[in-house]
Amino acid sequence: MAIQKTFGIIKPDAVRKKVAGNIISKIEDSGLSVVAIKKLHLTKAQAQAFYAVHKEKGFYNELVDFMISGPVFVMVLEGNEAITAWRTLMGATNPSNAADGTLRKLFASSVQENAVHGSDAPETAAQEIKFFFADTDIISA
Ligand code: ADP
Ligand code: MG
């Protein structure tokens, strides 16, 4: 077991539904710690750059529009095997495939409006944390 950091977003649909607090509770209940957090309204340029890996996908423009449709919470999470632990807590991308008890099963509305984002590997976690946070913003505890 290794302590890792990963990156998460509470997406605009979840912030609008006022379930950000519930999501943070479930993160803490799972054993992960929130070691940095801020509320942001992404610009179009930020959302396009953040999701650049998907720019050839049919859903890219709609995804960017959704991600700028309201404020989000961006977070750094820390804990044992945090990258996998966070993806497991999130559940499958499409909420109809998400396991019971996962955040997407509980809170997602659709495959697009799916409540949360999580890094999928150590490289993307490092890259995504850097996209939003300076080292001095992260308070491990
Ligand atoms: P994940 O967020 O589980 O890592 P992806 O990286 O494949 O999933 O996709 C990024 C985001 O793009 C998803 O979380 C979702 O908001 C959106 N998305 C993915 N697939 C679709 C789709 N088929 N239609 C609409 N939006 C999608
Ligand atoms: Mg992804």
Image: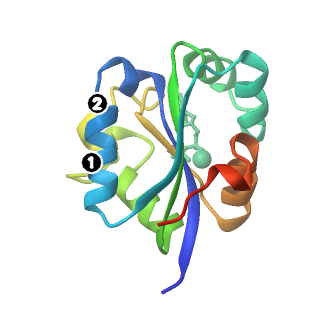
Residue shown at 39% from the left, 63% from the top? 32
Q: Position of residue 41 (x, y in %)?
A: 59, 19
Residue 64 figure quarter:
top right
Q: Which residue extends farthest left?
A: 100
Looking at the rendered structure, the kind of residue marked 2 is Val
Looking at the rendered structure, the kind of residue marked 1 is Ser
Residue shown at 73% from the left, 16% from the top? 44
Closer-to-camera residue (127/141): 141
Q: Position of residue 129 (x, y in %)?
A: 68, 51
Instruction: Say if 112 sits above or below 91 in the image.
Output: above
Q: Earlier in the sequence, mark 1 or mark 2?
A: 2
Asked if one can make out residue 73 in the rendered structure from this viewpoint, the answer is yes
Label 2: element kind: loop
Q: Which residue extends farthest bottom?
A: 1
Q: Residue 109 vs residue 131: left or right?
A: left
Instruction: Say if 107 sits above or below 103 in the image.
Output: above
Asked if one can make out residue 91 in the rendered structure from this viewpoint, the answer is no
Instruction: Say if 69 sits above or below 9 in the image.
Output: above
Residue shown at 54% from the left, 12% from the top? 69
Q: Position of residue 58 (x, y in %)?
A: 67, 25
Which residue is label 1 attached to? 25
Disc 1: residue Cβ within 8 A of ligand 1's nearest atom: no
Which residue is label 2 attached to? 19
Q: Residues within 10 Å of mark 2 (few under 14, many from 20)?
A: some
Do tag 1 and tag 2 residues touch (Cβ < 8 Å)?
no
Q: Residues within 10 Å of mark 1 (few under 14, many from 20)?
A: few
* Mark pair 1, 2: CA separation: 10 Å
Q: Position of residue 54 (x, y in %)?
A: 72, 37
Q: Residue 113 vs residue 8: left or right?
A: left
